[in-house]
Image (spheres, rainbow, N blue to C red):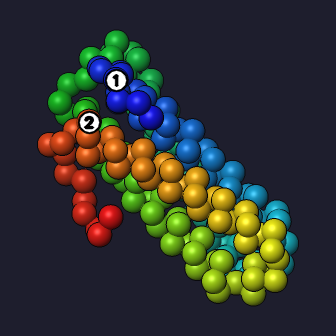
C-alpha cells in the first residue's frame, strides 16, 4: 500500500481491511472444504472466525460510508476510532495466524493432507501481508497512535 493518499489515507486502509477480512473469511471456508475430516474443535473455531471476519468487514464498510458522507473530513474522534479499529483488525489477524499455526501442527487431518498444508501456509502469508499493511498504517500514518505492542 502506498502512503501518498493524503486525507484519503483512512479510506485506503479501510478498503484494504474490507478486502482482507473478506479474504480471511473465505479462507476459513477453503480450509473447511479441503480438509473434510478436520477435527471438530477446528471446524468450530474456523466457523466462528469466519463470522468474526464477516463482522469486521462490515464495520470497515460502515467506516468507509461514514468517511464518504463526511466528504473525507474526519474529526479527531472519528480518526481515533478508525485507528482503534485498524489496531483491532491487526491483532485479529495475528490471532488467526496463531490458529492456522496450531491447525498445521496439531491437526492429524491436516498433517496427512499435503495440499491442506500448502493452502494453510498460503493463507498464513496473506494474513501476514494484511498485518504488514495495518502495521505500516498505524506506525507511519499516525505516529501519535497507540498501537498496542505485543512483541511485533
Q: Which residue is mark 1?
A: 4
Q: Which residue occupies 35% across, 29% down?
A: 3
Q: Is residue 130 left or right of residue 85?
A: right
Q: Is residue 2 above or below residue 99?
A: above
- Picture quadrant of residue 14: top left
In the orientation shown, which residue stands out farthest toward the left? Answer: 144
Q: Is residue 120 above or below residue 17?
A: below
Q: Which residue occupies 40% across, 53% down?
A: 90
Report helix, strand or loop for mark 2.
Answer: helix
Which quadrant is home to the C terminus? bottom left
Q: Could you say which is closer to the camera, residue 83 or residue 54?
A: 83
Residue 58 can be seen, yes or no: no
How far across and down, in percent of the image, does residue 117 sit?
73, 72
Q: Is residue 96 left or right of residue 135?
A: right
Q: Which residue is mark 2?
A: 141
- Picture quadrant of residue 22: top right
Q: Is residue 77 above or below residue 31?
A: above
Q: Which residue occupies 53% across, 66% down?
A: 97
Q: Could you say which is closer to the camera, residue 139 or residue 28?
A: 139
How far across and down, in percent of the image, does residue 81 sit?
27, 40
Which quadrant is home to the N terminus? top left
Callout 2: 10 Å neighbours few (<14), some, many (20+)? Answer: some
Callout 1: 10 Å neighbours few (<14), some, many (20+)? Answer: few
Q: Nearer the viewer, mark 1 or mark 2?
A: 1
In the orientation shown, which residue stands out farthest toward the top? Answer: 71
Residue 68 can be seen, yes or no: yes
Report helix, strand or loop for mark 1.
Answer: loop
Amino acid at each position: 500500500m502506498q502512503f501518498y493518499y493524503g486525507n484519503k489515507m483512512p479510506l485506503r486502509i479501510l478498503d484494504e481491511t474490507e478486502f482482507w477480512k473478506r479474504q480471511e473469511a473465505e479462507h476459513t471456508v477453503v480450509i473447511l472444504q479441503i480438509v473434510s475430516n478436520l477435527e471438530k474443535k477446528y471446524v468450530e473455531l474456523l466457523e466462528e472466525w469466519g463470522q468474526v471476519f464477516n463482522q469486521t468487514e462490515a464495520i470497515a464498510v460502515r467506516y468507509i460510508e461514514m468517511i464518504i458522507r463526511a466528504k473525507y473530513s474526519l474529526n479527531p474522534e472519528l480518526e481515533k476510532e478508525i485507528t482503534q479499529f485498524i489496531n483491532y483488525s491487526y491483532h485479529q489477524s495475528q490471532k488467526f495466524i496463531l490458529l492456522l499455526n496450531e491447525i498445521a501442527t496439531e491437526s492429524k487431518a491436516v498433517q496427512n493432507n499435503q495440499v491442506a498444508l500448502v493452502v494453510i501456509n498460503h493463507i498464513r502469508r496473506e494474513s501476514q501481508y494484511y498485518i504488514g499493511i495495518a502495521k505500516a498504517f498505524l506506525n507511519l500514518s499516525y505516529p501519535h497512535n497507540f498501537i498496542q505492542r505485543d512483541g511485533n
